[in-house]
Amino acid sequence: MSVDRTEEVSTATVPEALTAQATVSTYPVAPGVRLNVRSGPGTGYGIVRLLPEGARVPIFCQTPGTKVSGPYGTSNIWDNIDNGEYVSDAYVHTGSDGYVADRCS
């Protein structure tokens, strides 16, 4: 499968703990989806904001969490998109069923 990596984010928007990466690829959220952004890697964490339809997200790191079923399958991988902000990888088109970024520490 190919990975859609057409946009990059400057390090000015990268969380401090992750500034070792010069650039970070962004990935599209599933079409027609307004995606919940949570404060941790699971559905038990609070919603901190809602991404609009057509959003793209950077993935700074990934971590296991609650298993979720979405347009791109069932996954327990959660994508860290900002400090304290996570989305289920089942809603992000990474072109892979596995990890595409380093594990969060």
Image: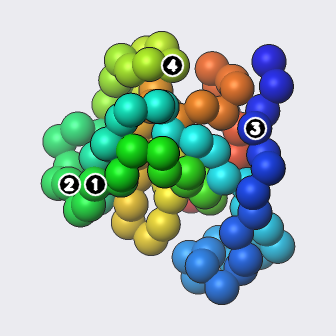
Classify mark 1: helix, strand or loop.
strand
- Disc 2 residue crowd, few under 14, some 14–19, many 20+, Cα 10 Å: some
CA gap, disc 1 and disc 4: 19 Å
Q: Name the residue carrying label 4.
A: 72
Q: Identify the residue shown where x is 69% and y is 24%.
A: 96
- The disc, 2 or 4, on the residue closer to the chain's N-terminal end is 2
Classify mark 3: helix, strand or loop.
loop
The numbered disc on residue 63 is: none
Q: Name the residue carrying label 3.
A: 4
Q: Name the residue carrying label 1.
A: 50
Query: How far across and down, in percent of the image, does residue 29 sit?
Result: 50, 39
Quadrant of the image occupied by residue 9: bottom right
Q: Identify the residue shown where x is 70% and y is 46%.
A: 101
Quadrant of the image occupied by residue 24: bottom right
Dot in front, 2 or 3: 3
- Quadrant in which the N terminus appears: top right
Query: How far across and down, in percent of the image, does residue 83 sit?
Result: 44, 70
- Quadrant in which the C terminus appears: bottom right
